[in-house]
């Protein structure tokens, strides 16, 4: 299914566990309650996709575009999101436990109540992200401090590994 076009498709409750969806187009697709766990969605286009309550645990979503996507209550535990574009996305109540967000652009995203425990945030960009707290960030790990966080939080600039 690599490079397949699912733009604007209604895929509510779709079972795409372990699917190969490399460079697939899911722009404006409805994937509410879908199971995309263990899938390969590297470089996929999920711009403005509806992914509320979807399961994306252990999924490869590296270099994917999720601008404006709704990821409310999504599970992304152990997901690989390196260099993904999550600009203007909604990640409220998202479970990102141990997810790799290295270099991910989270500019203008909404992160209220998102679980970032043990997530890797090295070089992630949080400019103008809302709902994110110092407590959430301190539960994550990084080699280099994520960008765009409030200076007044006085976070360690490098090698932050909680729960070690």
Image: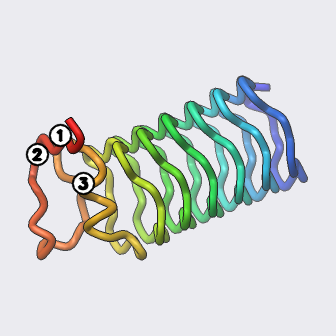
Q: Position of residue 76 (x, y in %)?
A: 56, 44
User: Which residue is at a point 75% across and 47% down the rendered structure image?
Assistant: 26
Number of marks in the image? 3
Residue 158 — which label? 2
Q: Position of residue 44 (x, y in %)?
A: 64, 39
User: Which residue is at a point 84% across and 55% down the rendered structure image?
Assistant: 8
Secondary structure beneath dot 1 equals strand
User: Which residue is at a point 63% across and 63% down the rendered structure image?
Assistant: 72
As displayed, is residue 51 above or below residue 5? below
Q: Position of residue 121 (x, y in %)?
A: 31, 47
Answer with the quarter of the image where residue 38 lies.
top right
- Residue that badge 1 annotates: 143
Q: CA distance from mark 2 to mark 1?
A: 5 Å
As displayed, is residue 140 above or below residue 15? below
Secondary structure beneath dot 2 equals strand
Secondary structure beneath dot 3 equals loop
In terms of depth relative to the viewer, which is nearer, 94 or 144? 94
As displayed, is residue 125 above or below residue 113? above
- Asked if marks 2 and 1 touch (Cβ < 8 Å), the reply is yes
Residue 146 — which label? 3
Left or right: residue 133 versus residue 108 is left
The quadrant of the image that shows the N terminus is top right
- Asked if marks 3 and 2 touch (Cβ < 8 Å), the reply is no
Badge 1 crowding class, 10 Å Cα cut-off, few under 14, some 14 to 19, many 20 or more, is some
Left or right: residue 25 versus residue 93 is right
Left or right: residue 26 versus residue 129 is right
């Amino acid at each position: 299914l690599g490079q397949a076009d699912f733009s604007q498709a209604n895929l509510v409750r779709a079972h795409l566990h372990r699917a190969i969806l490399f460079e697939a187009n899911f722009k404006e697709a409805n994937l509410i309650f879908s199971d995309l766990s263990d899938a390969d969605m590297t470089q996929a286009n999920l711009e403005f996709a509806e992914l509320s309550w979807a399961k994306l645990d252990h999924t490869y979503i590296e270099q994917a575009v999720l601008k404006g996507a709704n990821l409310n209550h999504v599970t992304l535990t152990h997901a690989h999101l390196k260099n993904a574009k999550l600009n203007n996305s909604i990640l409220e109540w998202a479970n990102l436990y141990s997810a790799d967000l290295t270099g991910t652009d989270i500019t203008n995203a909404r992160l209220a109540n998102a679980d970032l425990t043990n997530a890797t945030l090295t070089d992630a960009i949080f400019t103008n992200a809302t709902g994110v707290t110092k407590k959430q960030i301190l539960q994550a790990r990084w080699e280099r401090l994520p960008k765009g966080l409030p200076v007044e939080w006085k976070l360690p600039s490098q090698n932050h590994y909680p729960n070690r």
